[in-house]
Image (tube, helix red, strand yellow):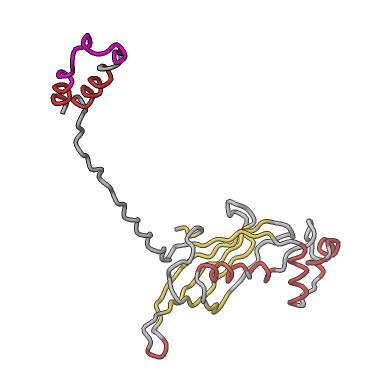
Amino acid sequence: MSTRICTKLSATPPVSQLPRSFISDSTEVPICAAAMRLGRRAIFPLVRTATTTTTPAAPPPPAVMSVGHALRERRRFTEADVAAYAAVSGDRNPVHLDDAAARELGGFQRGRVVHGMLLASLFPSVIASHFPGAVYASQTLKFPAPVYVGDDVIARVQALHIRAMAAANGGTASRYLVKFATKCFTDEEEGSLAIEGEAMAVLPTLELSSESTCKQ
């Protein structure tokens, strides 16, 4: 295309033959420069950009409890908790409600202590929070040491034995009878034992609803 444009321009009369009114320093330069630019225009190949699709990762399989797995819960029982339990249960023993009585009558040098059964309620709470629909069947308890009002406690339930139960009424869904070791400690290292015993519970599944506190 640039050849045709320049050919037409070369047929134009010499500048000396044009009337002075038509003579201009920029008469031919812009046209020829434009023609040259068209002639040198670069041609780039068409490149297709590859698009990659990422497949979302499959969710990890749910954690399944087996023998040896332990579940934990941390709790601090306040004065209000103890007073509320005393009102609901009717257990108004002064060793739980009065510091002086706890020291003089119960021999608890630091004052009021938490009801033992209130502490033991942590065990079914731990189990049910990980296995909704669990049915508590039995519990044995010993109280080696007191827990004082305001103390932090760590409740731990650990699976000792698991047995599959036949489905009721000929159904296909199975349930599981699990025997747990139940312990309650008053320090992070689980060195100060406050409660120990064993519990039996019927679970609708062995899949944990939360595995954040499940440890082997």
> At x 74% / y 77%, what residue is drawn?
89
Q: Is residue 13 left or right of residue 105?
A: left
Viewport quadrant of the N terminus: top left
> At x 84% / y 62%, what residue is drawn?
104
Nearest the viewer among 112 and 107 is 112
Magenta span includes 76: no
Residue 145: percent from the left, percent from the top? 68, 61
Which of the 4 image quarters holds residue 165? bottom left
Residue 188: percent from the left, percent from the top? 60, 52
Which of the 4 image quarters holds residue 167? bottom left
Q: Is residue 52 left or right of residue 64?
A: left
Residue 39: percent from the left, percent from the top? 18, 25
Magenta span includes 24: yes
Which of the 4 image quarters holds residue 122? bottom right
> At x 21% / y 28%, what residue is drawn?
42
Viewport quadrant of the C terminus: bottom left
Q: How many marks?
A: 0
User: Outermost residue toward the bottom?
Assistant: 169
Magenta residues span 9-25
Nearest the viewer among 210 and 6 is 6
